[in-house]
Image (tube, rainbow, N blue to C red):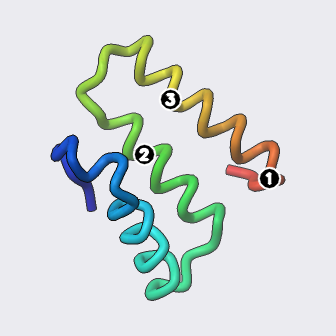
Amino acid sequence: MHSDDPGEFDSGYLSQLMLNFQQAGKFSKRDMVRLMLNAFKTTWLPDDEKQAYIDALKKWAAQRHVHI
């Protein structure tokens, strides 16, 4: 589940797709955070950019008491 189409990045499509996926699969917030964490780990971004996204995700999760 991904897109490399810049037109979809701000459209809300991917967010809605993630919500549908979570609901259909009955995944917890922790499951979804771990899914996103794995996605960031496997991107083709430079390591410093990749780490910035991972750090932001971990911060977001910690603020919401989601333990990963």
Q: Which residue is mark 2?
A: 38
Q: Distance of mark 1 from mark 2, alpha carbons?
A: 19 Å
Residue farthest to the left?
5
For discs 2 and 3, the disc positioned in front in the rendered view: 3
For discs 1 and 2, the disc positioned in front in the rendered view: 1
User: Which one is earlier in the sequence, the residue at label 1 or at label 2?
Assistant: 2
Q: Is residue 46 left or right of residue 67?
A: left
Q: Position of residue 65 (x, y in %)?
A: 83, 53
Q: Alpha-carbon neighbours of circle 2 within 10 Å: few (<14), some, or many (≥20)?
A: few
Q: Is residue 17 above or below residue 36?
A: below
Q: Position of residue 55 (x, y in %)?
A: 61, 27
Q: Position of residue 35 (x, y in %)?
A: 46, 56
- Residue at horizontal 46 percent and vertical 84 percent from the top: 25
Q: Is residue 56 left or right of residue 1?
A: right
Q: Distance of mark 2 from mark 3, alpha carbons?
A: 11 Å
- Residue at horizontal 29 percent and vertical 22 percent from the top: 45
Q: Alpha-carbon neighbours of circle 1 within 10 Å: few (<14), some, or many (≥20)?
A: few
Choose between 14 and 59: the one closer to the eye. Answer: 14
Q: Alpha-carbon neighbours of circle 3 within 10 Å: few (<14), some, or many (≥20)?
A: some
Q: Which residue is mark 1?
A: 64
Q: Is residue 26 above or below residue 28?
A: below
Choose top left, top right, bottom left or bottom right for residue 63.
Answer: top right
Q: Are marks 1 and 2 in contact (CB under 8 Å)?
A: no
- Residue at horizontal 78 percent and vertical 43 percent from the top: 62
Give the amino acid type for the residue marked by disc 3 in the picture: Tyr
**SS for tag 3?**
helix
Choose top left, top right, bottom left or bottom right for residue 6.
Answer: top left
The circle drawn on residue 53 is 3
